[in-house]
Amino acid sequence: MSRQSRPSETRKISSELFTLTYGALVSQLVKDYESDAEINKQLEKMGYNIGVRLIEDLLARTNVGRCQDFRETADVIAKIGFRTYLGITPTVTRWSAAMDEFSLVLDSNPLADFVELPEDHHKLLYSNILCGVLRGALEMVHQEVEVSFLRDTLRGDDATEIRLKFIKKLEDALPAGEE
Amino acid sequence: EVPDISFELLHGEIVRALKRFNEEEIGNSVEQKLDRMGFRVGQCWIERLTKDRVRFKDELEVVKYICKEFWMSLFNKQIDNLRTNHQGVYVLQDHKFHFFPQMSVTSQYSEEAPAFLAYPCGMMRGALVALGINSTVACEITSMPSCKFTITTLPA
């Protein structure tokens, strides 16, 4: 499939439309699924599919090379990924001693602007799509990670925090006998 | 600021996800769901946009507002052409509709197109209802990325 080249910095669609559209999606899922756990799962799955496509776009528009270590990966996620696609730069923090786990702390979250969670959905991870996006995108560059929401201001926490844990490096599935 | 590509990726995945859910047989058709989602967003959008505006004097003025201000606020461009039979049918043409730039000019996506248009149709219908006009809105791709919306107003 050949894709048309796109002018890189033309902003045509209102970003509030992005926020409202995401909100409409979550309300639809709330209607379609019984449990918050199931909604969270669906959002994560959708995010994964987006992440797989998004990384392609990211590699095409920037000249990010292979990351040397997980610390560099963290920097690219925050300073290039989040900045390019959501217009925010989360803080990379709370590294584990083994340097295989860190947190992204979001000062603001464009997905959740003007959002209030409905009363009876205490377990809903409103922005869980982001976890899926990160998992999908990183898988495409051969890193298996575990991503989860630790804190969310929507649920009354003092900050929004996403935790990433490095699981393993994925090898290219090469046919036997090659390389 | 969120760039277009983020919106495209999100909207595209919403369409595809609803299709997947539908295979699991949950509720209404994909187009109906997308239309309703768009309807609510359109309603909410136009209410904010027009809250300080003086009343519209007639239907045509409302439709013109949709073509100019409403479209501009969403897509940063106006509808290119408006025609009406003066009996409640309005045909709006956007020669460069920005909703699906990812769908290239190839016909590969023509099957998917109706689902991709349900959300913007719903938005337009929702905006019109908020301004007091009941209608049906249909949309067709005349030739990518040119798009034709047909508004048929219904008696109040």
Image (cartoon, coloured by chain):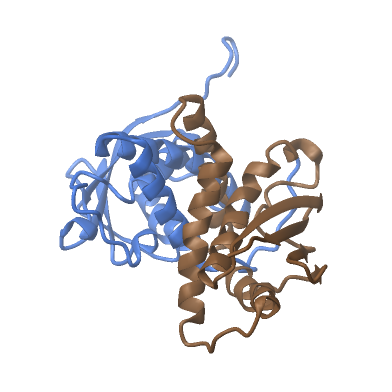
User: x%, y% of residue A88?
Assistant: 40, 65
- Tell me how many marks there are: 0
Vertical relation: B139 (above or below) B27:
below
Vertical relation: A70 (above or below) B95:
above
Q: Nearer the viewer, residue B72 or A44?
A: B72
User: x%, y% of residue A171?
Assistant: 47, 25
Quarter of the image where the C terminus of chain B is located: bottom right
Q: Is residue A31 rendered to the left or right of residue B27? A: left
Q: Nearer the viewer, residue A14 or A86?
A: A14
Residue found at x 61% / y 49%: B118
User: x%, y% of residue A81?
Assistant: 46, 55
Q: Which chain is depicted blue? A: A
Residue found at x 26% / y 35%: A35
Question: Can residue A80 be seen in the rendering of this structure?
Answer: no
Question: Can residue A57 be seen in the rendering of this structure?
Answer: yes
The quadrant holding residue B121 is bottom right
Residue at the top extreme of this rendering: A176
Q: Which chain is depicted brown? A: B
Residue found at x 38% / y 37%: A32
Q: Nearer the viewer, residue B38 or B84?
A: B84
Vertical relation: A149 (above or below) B49:
above
Residue found at x 38% / y 59%: A111
